[in-house]
Amino acid sequence: MRKIGFSPYKKRTKEVLPKTYKVGEREQQRKMFFTLINDSLPKEARISLKNTQLFQHDLLTIFTDKVQSFFQLYRLRPERSQSVRRIYTQESQLFDQFFKQCHDAKAQFMTKSLFFDQEFKMQERYKHPAAELIRQFFNGKDVEMMLDLDSLFRQTVYRRIKKEAGKRVTLDTPYIHIDQHGTRTRLHPRWKHVDPKDLGKRDGDIGEGFTQLKEEEIDQCYLVYPKTDTFKRHITVEDGTSERLKMIPYSFTFCNREGR
């Protein structure tokens, strides 16, 4: 199982970023990472894809800056007093804990706690979007975000399938099903490398696909993999009978366009 994200490593933060066709530069890979995960974040907490300079920074810095953007750090004098609309009690405890862990000047300025609480426990859910963002990569003690790349890939393929009248698209993990005109098509996205000159490395996937075509109620089976410099076109595979399946290269070049 492949993971992407970031984690502590020898007093620094180690990034593990996705690499695929025409997404080779580190800044492009960071943008691709946030393209993959934005839909899993609260709407207010999503990372803007328009600011290309943002991706010159590491993932942790981008997340931390986004959290801090919810607080008025730039104010040099008090705002006009306003009535209290909501008090975020649980969120305040989380903010203090997180800012204490950050160790940078801005974060330390915003916390009221004197000590990092080793007994602190995360809540199952928070109301403030900044708190929901924090809980994606902070467990109350350590900062880390390592996500299953297969799951992110599957979610991305599912989200980007064009919706049409008379077309039903369902996510039935680990598959995506498309029902249209009386035909059921199964997509099975997996983050694996495909070498068109050596399909034997994907024999397990191919055999599994043919078994499903014969034994399950599906009419077509597409095995979806990330596009590479050598795997750019659909490959049709036959099993010697009437059954056929396709291996589909999926391009992430849209990550370079989104947000422009």
Image (cartoon, rainbow, N blue to C red):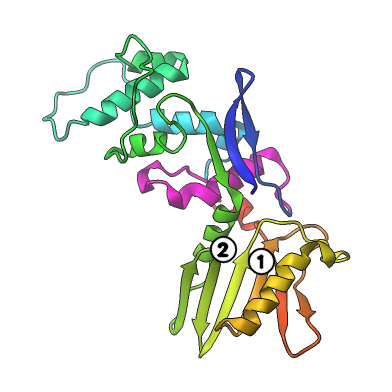
Q: Secondary structure at mark 2?
A: helix
Name which residue lies at 77% across and 70% down. 233
Name which residue lies at 78% across and 61% down. 194
At which x and y percent is residue 104?
A: 47, 15
At which x and y percent is residue 116?
A: 38, 14
Q: Secondary structure at mark 1?
A: strand
Instruction: From the viewer's side, name the closer residue of 13 and 107.
Output: 13
Instruction: Identify the residue position indicated by label 1 in the image.
Output: 224
Residue segment shown in magenta: 22-49
- Which callout, 1 or 2, points to the residue nearer the camera? 1
Q: Dot 1: within a 10 Å radius of its alpha carbon, few (fewer than 14), some, or many (20 or more) residues?
A: many
Instruction: Identify the residue position indicated by label 2 in the image.
Output: 157
Side of 81 where 219 appears, left or right: right
Q: Residue furthest top?
A: 114
Name which residue lies at 31% across and 13% down. 113
At which x and y percent is residue 25?
A: 71, 42
Q: Dot 2: within a 10 Å radius of its alpha carbon, few (fewer than 14), some, or many (20 or more) residues?
A: some
Residue 26 lies in the magenta stretch: yes
Instruction: From the viewer's side, name the closer residue of 201 and 232.
Output: 201
